[in-house]
Image (cartoon, grey):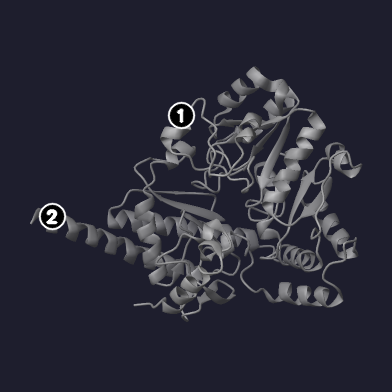
């Protein structure tokens, strides 16, 4: 049996100096409590109690080429030795910008920031500045950062969400300004009729449609055939901008992001996470005639730490690794599909109804009676308690997964890692089934 005693002691100590003992809301969830980690390398991460894990959390997605990649660390060390932050331009950021411009279809011009939340805000401001309109459309279940005007209807209850054809706009936390609800239209994902209807009613007020190309944060739900193209056509029809939030899908699906993967080019796109192997960076990319509003100062964008030297070096090095390995993306997808097949078989053998979704580069496991996940409402039928039990069982067997069901694959994972995870999943699911059967038997007796 694994011990988490040192982590427990540190967590109790942390609660005396940090709110909730953590530095991000999403780190509060954990079993038996938030763990403290000491190092990570490749596909492995180690906690302060000496426990080793095959890591499918990957720092919530950024570690696309694995933890502590030597080429990234070398480049960061070299760049940092020359300087950390100039509050001015440097050649490294120019070289990276030119490379990103070459790789990403919509990236005629870019602007660097430090987090996904920042780049999304820049995109919304630019969309308003360019169109002269104030409202925007977002979709139930999608996450675009923690700021007031986007943390809406990300995880509403069915009761608070209202009718599926015309969802309520639901604030996610106390302390949010209620005034932001006046600028948003919330719609169901994967429903073009709902988008067309919203534009028919209020098209002259809508600056943009903001969407994850894949609904990664709830169910890892891919767009239905023609859906993204339909959004493109509707935005063109009504003079609104199409904005892809590619903070997760960017670089994970391929060097050109989801827009190249699906063949639909947005007006603006936000990127981050997988770009810099764990160093803080994001960027807004867009078509030149739109980005010119930012270039000439009509729309303001700023940030002291934007294009800081270590993050730029990490991003450049990560892109070099991604470009140098011609089989990398096929290998990651293949490993992901292998994992999906194994989890599907393990669930069936244990007698659990489960839905496995996602393109492979990221995978989602849900315990649900639904035949498939198409939108956020389908995710409300997922048994979160059962998945939490499953995730704790995996942790105790040396496999670290995210509590909301999404698994990330990296270039450092091997077939042996995948098969190990599948085997451990089978053990956990059978143990859960046995525990449930014993509980039913004791009640019957």
Q: Earlier in the sequence, mark 1 or mark 2?
A: 1
**Element type at mark 1:** loop
Above/below status of 206 relative to 69: above
The residue positioned farthest toward the left in the image shown: 445
**Element type at mark 2:** helix
Judging depth in this view, the residue of 435 and 147 nearest the camera is: 147
Q: Position of residue 68 (x, y in %)?
A: 65, 74
Q: Is residue 194 left or right of residue 302?
A: left
Judging depth in this view, the residue of 220 and 255 nearest the camera is: 220
- The residue that label 2 is drawn on is 443
Q: Is residue 275 left or right of residue 163?
A: right
| Residue 264 at least partly seen | no
Q: What's the distance in space between the residues labelled 1 and 2, CA to CA?
A: 38 Å
| Residue 15 at least partly seen | yes
Q: Position of residue 216 (x, y in %)?
A: 55, 48
Above/below status of 99 relative to 165: below
* Mark drawn on residue 15: none
Judging depth in this view, the residue of 137 and 332 nearest the camera is: 137
Report the quarter where the C terminus lies: bottom left
Asked if the residue under mark 2 is in contact with the one under mark 1, i.e. CB atoms within 8 Å, the reply is: no
Report the quarter where the N terminus lies: bottom left
- The residue that label 1 is drawn on is 162
Q: Residue at x 86, y 75 (%)?
A: 82
Q: Position of residue 116 (x, y in %)?
A: 68, 52
Q: Position of residue 26 (x, y in %)?
A: 53, 57
The residue positioned farthest toward the front in the image shown: 16
Quadrant of residue 300 within the rendered picture: top right
Q: Residue at x 10, y 53 (%)?
A: 444
The residue positioned farthest toward the bottom in the image shown: 50
Q: How dense is the environment of label 2, judged by Cα within 10 Å: few (below 14), some, or many (20 and up)?
A: few
Quadrant of residue 319 within the rendered picture: bottom right
């Amino acid at each position: 049996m694994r011990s988490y005693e040192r982590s427990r002691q540190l967590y109790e100590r942390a609660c005396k100096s940090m709110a909730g003992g953590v530095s991000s809301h999403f780190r509060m969830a954990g079993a038996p409590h938030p763990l403290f980690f000491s190092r990570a390398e490749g596909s492995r991460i180690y906690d302060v109690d000496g426990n080793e894990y095959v890591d499918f959390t990957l720092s919530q997605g950024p570690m696309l080429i694995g933890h502590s990649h030597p080429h990234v660390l070398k480049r960061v060390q070299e760049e940092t030795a020359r300087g950390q932050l100039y509050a001015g331009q440097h050649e490294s950021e120019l070289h990276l910008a030119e490379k990103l411009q070459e790789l990403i279809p919509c990236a005629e011009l870019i602007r660097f920031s430090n987090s996904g939340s920042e780049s999304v805000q820049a995109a919304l401001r630019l969309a308003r500045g360019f169109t002269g309109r104030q409202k925007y459309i977002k979709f139930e279940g999608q996450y675009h950062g923690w700021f007031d005007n986007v943390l809406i209807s990300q995880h509403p209850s069915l009761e608070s969400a209202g009718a599926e054809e015309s969802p309520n706009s639901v604030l996610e936390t106390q302390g949010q300004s209620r005034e932001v609800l006046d600028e948003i239209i919330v719609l169901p994902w994967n429903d073009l009729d709902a988008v067309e209807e919203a534009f028919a009613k209020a098209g002259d007020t809508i600056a943009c449609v903001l969407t994850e190309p894949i609904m990664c944060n709830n169910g890892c739900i891919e767009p239905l055939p023609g859906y993204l193209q339909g959004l493109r056509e509707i935005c063109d029809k009504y003079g609104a901008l199409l904005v892809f939030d590619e903070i997760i899908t960017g670089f994970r699906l391929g060097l050109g992001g989801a827009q190249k993967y699906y063949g639909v080019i947005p007006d603006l796109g936000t990127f981050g996470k997988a770009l810099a192997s764990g160093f803080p960076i994001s960027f807004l990319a867009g078509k030149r005639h739109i980005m010119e509003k930012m270039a000439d100062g009509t729309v303001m964008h700023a940030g002291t730490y934007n294009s800081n030297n270590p993050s730029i070096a990490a991003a450049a090095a990560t892109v070099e690794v991604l470009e140098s390995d011609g089989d990398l993306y096929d290998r990651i997808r293949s490993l992901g599909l292998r994992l999906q097949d194994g989890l599907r078989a393990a669930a069936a053998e244990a007698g659990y109804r489960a839905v496995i979704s996602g393109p492979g580069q990221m995978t989602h496991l849900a315990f649900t009676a639904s035949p498939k996940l198409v939108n956020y409402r389908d995710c409300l039928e997922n048994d979160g308690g059962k998945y939490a039990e499953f995730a704790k069982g995996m942790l105790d067997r040396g496999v670290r997964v995210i509590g909301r069901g999404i698994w990330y694959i990296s270039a450092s994972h091997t077939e042996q890692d995948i098969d190990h995870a599948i085997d451990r999943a089978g053990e956990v699911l059978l143990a859960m089934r046995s525990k449930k059967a014993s509980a039913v038997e004791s009640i019957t007796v």
